[in-house]
Amino acid sequence: MVLTFKKQPMKKNVGSTDKLIRILLGLIIGLLGIYYQSWLGLIGVVPVLTAFIGFCPAYAPFGISTCKKTDA
């Protein structure tokens, strides 16, 4: 049995308000990691990265998009 996956382009699914929230939360998580000297602060990279890319892989399977129709 061979599983094949259809390649789909990464469509923008992160809107401007969502981007702002992701950047702020990512920075807060990262700064808390530095403050508490914990490597768990690296988790803050994920929301910042998805904000700058404009694509959230967790949204894709559910068809969620926070973009306005004109953003996409």
Image (cartoon, grey):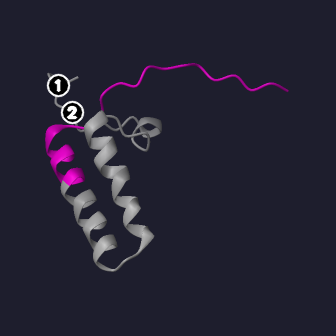
At x 43%, y 69%, the residue is 40
- Magenta: predominant secondary structure element? loop
- 20 lies above or below 71: below
* Secondary element type, mark 1: loop
Q: Quadrant of the C terminus?
A: top left
Q: Measured from the top left, where is residue 42 in percent x and y?
A: 40, 61
Q: Amino acid at mark 2?
A: Cys
Residue to which mark 1 is pinned: 71
Relative depth, front residue between 10 and 27:
27
| Label 2 crowd (10 A; few <14 / some 14-19 / many >=20) | some
* Picture residue at 16% right of the left edge, 30% below the top: 68
Residue occupying image coordinates x 21% and y 51%: 23
Residue holding disc 2? 67
Is residue 24 found left or right of 30 in the rendered image?
left
Q: Tell me which residue sits at (37%, 66%) in the image.
A: 41
Q: Is residue 23 above or below residue 11?
A: below
Tell me if label 2 and label 1 are in contact, CB under 8 Å.
yes
Res 24 → quadrant: bottom left
Compute the Cα span from label 2 to label 1. Answer: 6 Å
Neighbourhood count class around disc 1 (C-alpha, 10 Å): few under 14, some 14–19, many 20 upward: few
Q: Position of residue 49 (x, y in %)?
A: 33, 44
Magenta-drawn segment: 1-23
Residue 30: image quadrant is: bottom left
Can you say which quadrant of the picture contains the N terminus? top right
